[in-house]
Image (cartoon, coloured by chain):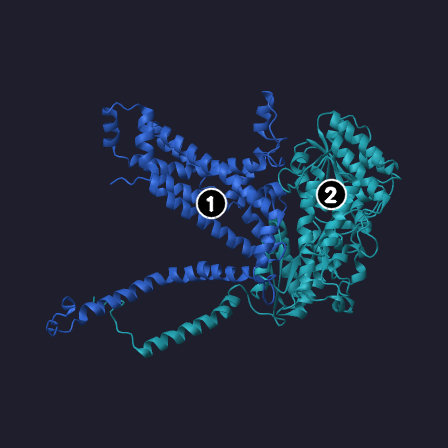
Chain colours: A cyan, B blue
Amino acid sequence: MSNSLFSRSIDRRTILRSGLLGVLGLAAAPAVAACGGGSGSSAGGSVSWAAWANPGEDERYKQFAAELGKKIDAKVNFQAVVGDYQAKLLSQLAGGSAPDAFYVGDADMAKMIDAKQISDLTDYLSRGQSPAKLEDFPEDLYQWCKPADGSAGIFGIPVDCNPSVFWYNKDVLSAAGVSQDPAQLFEAGTWTPDALEDLLGKVRASGKKGLILSNWWFNWCTATTMFGGQLTDESGKLVLADDPKAQEGLEWLLEQFKSGNITYAGSLPKGQSGDALFLAGQLALNNVGRWALPTLKDVKFGFDIVPIPSPSGKDILPAPVATAAIALNAKAKNPEKALELIGNYVSRDGQKFRLSGGGNAVPSIKGLDEVATEGGIPAHGQWFNDVVAKGYAIPRAFVGNPKTATELPLLVDKLFKDSATTAASFSSAVTELVESGK
Amino acid sequence: MSTLTAAPAPERVAEPPRRGPSRRRRKDTIAALVFLSPQLVGLAAFMVGPLVFALVLAFSNWDGFGAATFAGFANFSEVLSNPRIQRSVVNTVWFTVLQVPGLMISSFVFALLMQKAGKMTSAYRLCFVAPVVTSSVAVAAIWLWLFNPEISPVSSALRSIGIQAPDWLQDPNFVIPAFAIVSIWQGLGYQLVMFMAGLQSIGSSYLEAAELDGCTGWQKLVHVTIPLLSPTILFLSITSIIGSFQIFDYIYVFMDSNAPEAARTIVYEIVQIAFREFNFGQASALAFLLLLSLLGVTALQLAAQKRWVHYAE
């Protein structure tokens, strides 16, 4: 045993020497790690951003990072977050290791602002050198990026968006005896709620599903404006319960649920939502955004989109628009470059780079209509842009308080499953929840 | 008091110094600590540390950012009085009631059948164990399709014979049984292997003796096999109950962060409250109450085992 590892006497000097080497090793670790992923340094240092991304987006974002790095003379790193984005981001923020900029979902923005985790972008967006200005974006797309208490500041910029439209399966409609498809009806100025109801009735009679809606605000809020009603007033206050047209829309929706024209999909975001049935040729209309496009490119059936119907039959009414924002980490290591990253990311050039070539969203910035109409798929892609121009992102009333944001879908689910629910009881319950969260 | 008189102390014989063994013991201890240190550091960093931190958080108001403030028992009272959490507790207990006996009985039955499978035993075992080594996310994705009332082959088959399959994940009465079915299907392989090992360890002499005494097959099962399997049953019941109280992954894959009240369980609520509502204090209080409940249930099981668990010599 004399030559074993533990038989050697360990004197104080040896311990101190080992400890010193260990400390040096630990101290050098971050520097070594930082060097490991890089391929040389840039004069402007490095800057990073994080987002959720599917494999296609991940590839595109990395290309964007490489291009942007050349432009802003910095090493730009993209962190794709797979899985529970919010939990991972929170852990990074708590540990002080969050990237310089990151995506923020609509339900988290108010808390991020309140906790001072993200910085006000107003100053940067008004500067001359910013490649994107606030006025370049439709006003109703970024209201949720303002503080919930109504104070000044803009803490995030929508990176892109997805308007609520109906995708329809031409083959299912044709098999159900629908002679004019929704786009033709819209162009003829007869795309009204009655026309939609008539279409849904025919599809139901043919044994297929007409339309599936969930408890997500993006789905059910379409009904509140379909008859010309308002969900919120200009100050962002929920007026659902006081607006007769909004009530009419909700009443119509509840009637469609009862008749079976529209199926309530509950709270299933995956697999059992309309997407699977639409692809399987079992569903006529699917109320989703442009994100459906990549999966539809190879299908055998004909498809197109149409806006939510209107009383006039030819107008595009305000409709929900899903969006996420990019925000500046309040503790960004390189805030100037991070601002440049954000500005370029949401600029026309940035959005065009990210969304062209089969992207799954619509630009949130004005003047990029060609992205949504690219390749003529779907045939009426321009309507995406038209809906975005008039649409609205999630009301601040729904996401001003994290508890309200999580409880609203639960409440809506419960109300839609209760056969005794009326438009009035629905509206008052939703309003009460929103008010209780203030 | 003479009896208490101290006897004269024996003369101490001066012992030669025995430095060898004590030095060796010390070296062995150091060696053991060095070998154990990676595990101990991991245990301290990832188990004990978070546990203590969670306990501190349970008595704090903390939103995940900035400083925490002392909350006393407010988080506990909030958690105990929240109807949404009460519902999730009921759902969790209902899941446990369905899943634990369902899993143990089916595993035991299949293990008994496998005893008679002959050369096919390995093939059957592979089939049963395959779901165990499949990730819960993949399992949930398959079942999401099987539970879909519109396109599920199971629903279609039932419809063809005149039975209307329930809308498993939408119907508040069926969603928890649906989770239990998936969980039983996935957990079957593990418990099956454990029961098979237990059955194989029962000495044939016990069964032969029972046979000589004229026992029927059923009597041998009830009076010999099950009592001798009782240590395995105890172990599986403890681990199953703990596992069933922690159900989260299926729900998260099935429903994402948007599960209806009828489908929410305790751990699902903990994640929601912490990471969606930014209320780490309440989430920790709920987690701590879950820990106490599980400790209580396990203690009861261990206390009761003296009455029914038989350890063969």
Q: Position of residue A337 (x, y in %)?
A: 66, 68
- Mark 1 → mark 2, Cα distance in angstroms: 36 Å
Q: Position of residue A202 (x, y in %)?
A: 78, 27
State the residue position of label 2.
Answer: A219
Nearest the eye: A416 or B39: A416
- In the picture, residue B189 is in which quadrant? top left
Q: Quadrant of the N terminus of chain A?
A: bottom left
Secondary element at image label 1: helix
Q: Position of residue A368 (x, y in %)?
A: 78, 53
- B110 to B187, vertically: above or below: above
Q: Measuring 24% from the left and 25% from the top, which residue is drawn there?
A: B213
* Residue that protrudes farthest toward the top in the picture: B161
Give the side of residue A433 with respect to residue B123, left or right: right
Residue A380: tell me if it is visible: no
> Which amino acid is tagged 1?
Gly
- In the picture, residue A16 is in which quadrant? bottom left
Crowdedness near tag 1: few (<14), some (14–19) or many (≥20) residues, C-alpha within 10 Å = some
> Which amino acid is tagged 2?
Asn
State the residue position of label 1.
Answer: B243
Give the side of residue B71 with respect to residue A204, left or right: left
